[in-house]
Image (spheres, grey):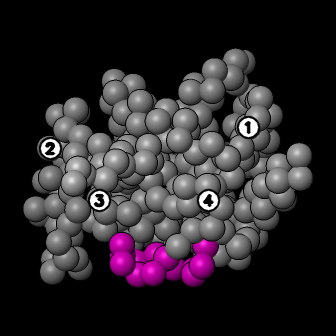
Amino acid sequence: MGARKLSPLDAVCRDVASCRACPRLVEWREDIAREKRAMFRDDTYWGRGVPGFGDAQAQLLVLGLAPAAHGANRTGRVFTGDKSGDWLYRAMHKAGFANQPTSQHIDDGLHLNNAWVTAAVKCAPPANAPTPDERVTCRPFLEREFAALDNAHVLVCLGAFAYQAATEFLHIRPRPKFGHGVEVQHGKWTLLCSFHPSQQNTFTGKLTEPMFDNIFERARELCAIGAQE
């Protein structure tokens, strides 16, 4: 018997995990996986490209920047094992998009409902800053995810870079100014902008829990509207 044919989403997840197209990112993610952070010294780091995660029938797509060096680059699941993930899945759980409010490791039982979470760049970059060339090289993975998520029509952009990546992919010109809570309608898509749940934003109060919860409450409303059309 032949091997089971992968779905388009399974295929892109496989290809993300095996990608070595960007030498700088490959070197960085693997160095981090070898050296580790002291508090995670007993963990086996993923150290590869980090695929998207969630419900293949999702109406909601959540887009971030890139995996964190000791978060998703360690755990192998996007927004898992760091403070940003704590904020994200807590808010998604409150809005009914996740079955639990925490995301600690890849086998912790987290399941998403009507949502798919991914990043514009699939490898952890030095200083959390992929180069323009690395962004372009990684873009086909995001294009394949968009194409495979037939039901998706609500796009939460976590941070200005995710918003830039989304507007470039969707050919939105001119690009409306990014801001928390800004909504942009383009074809079937509603882009919903949020400040990124980074510690820089959450520790300073630039992003509060009520602000973040409101984003996913609004996303739920937009999904419900889409289901009625």
Q: The residue tagged with tag 4: helix, strand or loop?
A: strand
Residue identified by numbered label 3: 73
Q: Is residue 144 left or right of residue 229?
A: left
| Crowd tier of the residue under label 2, counting other residues whose Cα lies within 10 Å: few below 14, some 14–19, many 20 or above | some
Residue identified by numbered label 2: 27
- Label 1 with label 2: CB-CB less than 8 Å: no
- 26 in the magenta segment: no
In percent of width and height, residue 59 lies at 69, 52
Which of the two discs, 3 and 2, labels the residue nearer the N terminus?
A: 2
- Res 195 seen here: no
Q: Name the residue type under label 1.
A: Trp
Numbered circle sitting on residue 189:
1
Calculate the distance from the C-alpha at mark 4 to the C-alpha at mark 1: 14 Å
In percent of width and height, residue 21 lies at 22, 32
Which of the two discs, 3 and 1, labels the residue nearer the N terminus?
A: 3
Q: Name the residue type under label 2.
A: Glu
| Crowd tier of the residue under label 1, counting other residues whose Cα lies within 10 Å: few below 14, some 14–19, many 20 or above | some
Calculate the distance from the C-alpha at mark 1 to the C-alpha at mark 2: 36 Å
| Crowd tier of the residue under label 3, counting other residues whose Cα lies within 10 Å: few below 14, some 14–19, many 20 or above | many
Which of the two discs, 1 and 2, labels the residue nearer the N terminus?
A: 2
Calculate the distance from the C-alpha at mark 3 to the C-alpha at mark 1: 30 Å
Point out the residue furthest to the left here: 34
Q: The residue tagged with tag 2: helix, strand or loop?
A: helix
Q: Residue at x 53, y 41 (%)?
A: 148
